[in-house]
Image (cartoon, rainbow, N blue to C red):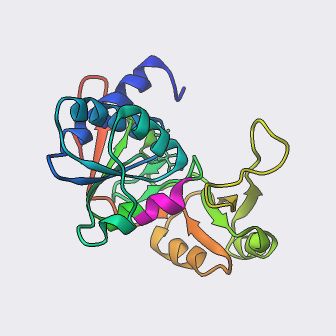
Amino acid sequence: MKNDSGTAAQKRRAGESAAAEVTDGMVVGLGTGSTAAHAIEELGRAVDAGLDIRGVPTSFQSRQLAVEAGIPLVSLDEVEDTGVDLAIDGADQFDAAGHLMKGGGAAHAREKIVDASADRFLVVADPSKESDPLDYPVPLEVLPDARTLAAERVRDLGGDPDLRAAERKDGPVVTDNGNLVLDCDFGAVEHPEALAADLADIPGCVAHGLFVGMADEIHVGTATGVEVR
Ligand SMILES: O=C[C@H](O)[C@H](O)[C@H](O)COP(=O)(O)O
């Protein structure tokens, strides 16, 4: 179960552990999802206590949480000179090499921009996210007009694309960027670097959920503490 109290506590420990790495003056990338939310809440408490930071949200969801938590926000444009000091973000899966699958919340396009802009990128996760090899269907954000061609190219690569449907509306999920998501099942991904390159080449692909070689640390919340990998 993704949301039982054990897993929720593990996510909280991971989020709080990564938030503890944030220091005064930092520009911080604020990830999306239920685990990164714990880091945002913890940073909000630290801001209340006097921590001076600026946050760069990765989604509508993380922006809302940060506003509620009282974290001052900036856009990537506004930190052109300073860049992002540290990003904290969740993952749908991670492997032993530190490669990630992201995009379960359809936020991976902006997450990839913010996480790649950071001097240090910390992933927060619970132990259920570990998978070797990665086998979570790869989320592919595509321009709406590219949907049919992109699905065809995914099939050519050996994948099974499925247009992500919205849960409480008829029709597809539309991302924060106005695009669609194809969840592309490739089974076990034995060569993430090669698949990442092939997917990036698909016309109309905005971003795929493979984050290859990007993570600096993975904070894994356990039943009793946090393992940093
Ligand atoms: O698009 C969503 C993001 O990549 C999330 O960081 C990812 O889905 C993990 O979310 P959660 O921590 O809720 O499992």
Taking the image as shown, residue 121 lies to the left or right of residue 30, namely left
Q: In the image, is residue 191 part of the stretch drawn in magenta? A: no
- Foreground: 156 or 8? 8
Identify which residue is drawn at 43% across, 26% down.
Answer: 7
The range drawn in magenta is 107-113
Could you tell me if residue 73 is visible in this image?
yes
Q: In the image, is residue 108 part of the stretch drawn in magenta? A: yes
- Foreground: 12 or 68? 68
Image coordinates for residue 199, horizontal then vertical, percent: 59, 74
Q: Quadrant of the N terminus?
A: top right
Taking the image as shown, residue 1 lies to the left or right of residue 77, namely right
Identify which residue is drawn at 39% across, 53% down.
Answer: 95
Identify which residue is drawn at 75% across, 74% down.
Answer: 146
Identify which residue is drawn at 50% across, 54% down.
Answer: 102
Image coordinates for residue 30, horizontal then vertical, percent: 38, 48
Image coordinates for residue 210, horizontal then vertical, percent: 49, 63
| Furthest-right residue in this view | 170
